[in-house]
Amino acid sequence: MIQAIRETNFDAYVETEAKRIDTSVSSSMIRHLAKFTNDLDGAVFYVYPALETINDRYTKLEFDYSASPSVYTSVNLKPAGYYKYELYEVSWSGAVAISSGNAPVSETDVLPVGPTHGVVQGLVAIGKLYLGEKSGSEEVQYTEYDQPASTNYIYYGQ
């Protein structure tokens, strides 16, 4: 599970190398497209991590926050709560170019064939993200009430 705070940058450590699909290219020619789906309202957000560090057993994905998000550089997840994440492997045969026209914007996006055009290879990771509220105004607030004096009410307390 990934844990993050809303309106901040966050890092995720995910096992990707064991599930590599396109092994014909080096790890430096691979990037990952993240898909975040909100459990409450079903909103979907796509983003490429700002930085990926691929290690032997895991990949460190660094996601940047921006009030004006872009699938190529940053994300603005809202509201706070639980999200399902899916990580898709995208490979390049030439120079890696995460920009408009060179990087797929969803798992079903197909670009024309070209060395600087990424190709979605498939799903390599699924999990949960918990996004906490930065200021505390979005999440449900609970208040404990005193026990009533009369017994005409159902009391659920301490």
Image: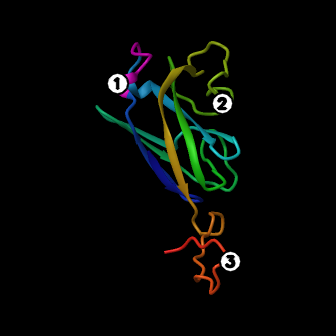
**Residue 32 image offset from top left, x and y in percent:** 50, 31
Q: Would residue 91 be seen by someone viewing this image from the given angle? A: no
Mark 2 Cα shell of 10 Å, populated few (<14), some (14-19), many (≥20): many
Is 47 situated left or right of 29 in this image? right
**Residue 72 image offset from top left, x and y in percent:** 62, 39
Query: At 63% across and 54% down in the image, what residue appears?
Result: 66
Q: Which residue is mark 2?
A: 105
Place residue 86 in its image quadrant: top right
Place residue 19 in its image quadrant: top left
Asked if the magenta segment contains residue 118, the reply would be no
Query: At 54% across and 38% down in the image, what residue appears?
Result: 85
The image shows residue 109, relative to residue 87, as above or below, that is above
The image shows residue 126, relative to residue 25, as above or below, that is below
Q: Which residue is mark 3?
A: 152
**Residue 138 image offset from top left, x and y in percent:** 66, 64
Quadrant in which the N terminus is drawn:
top left
Q: 30 or 86, which lies in front?
A: 86
Query: At 68% across and 32% down in the image, what residue appears?
Result: 100
Mark 1 Cα shell of 10 Å, populated few (<14), some (14-19), many (≥20): few
The extreme bottom residue here reads 149
Helix, strand or loop under label 3 = loop
Q: Which residue is mark 1?
A: 18
Q: Earlier in the sequence, mark 1 or mark 3?
A: 1
Span of residues in magenta: 17-24
Q: 96 or 66, which lies in front?
A: 66
Mark 2 vs mark 1, foreground winner is 1
Q: Would residue 49 be seen by someone viewing this image from the given angle? A: yes
Name the amino acid type tagged 3: Asn
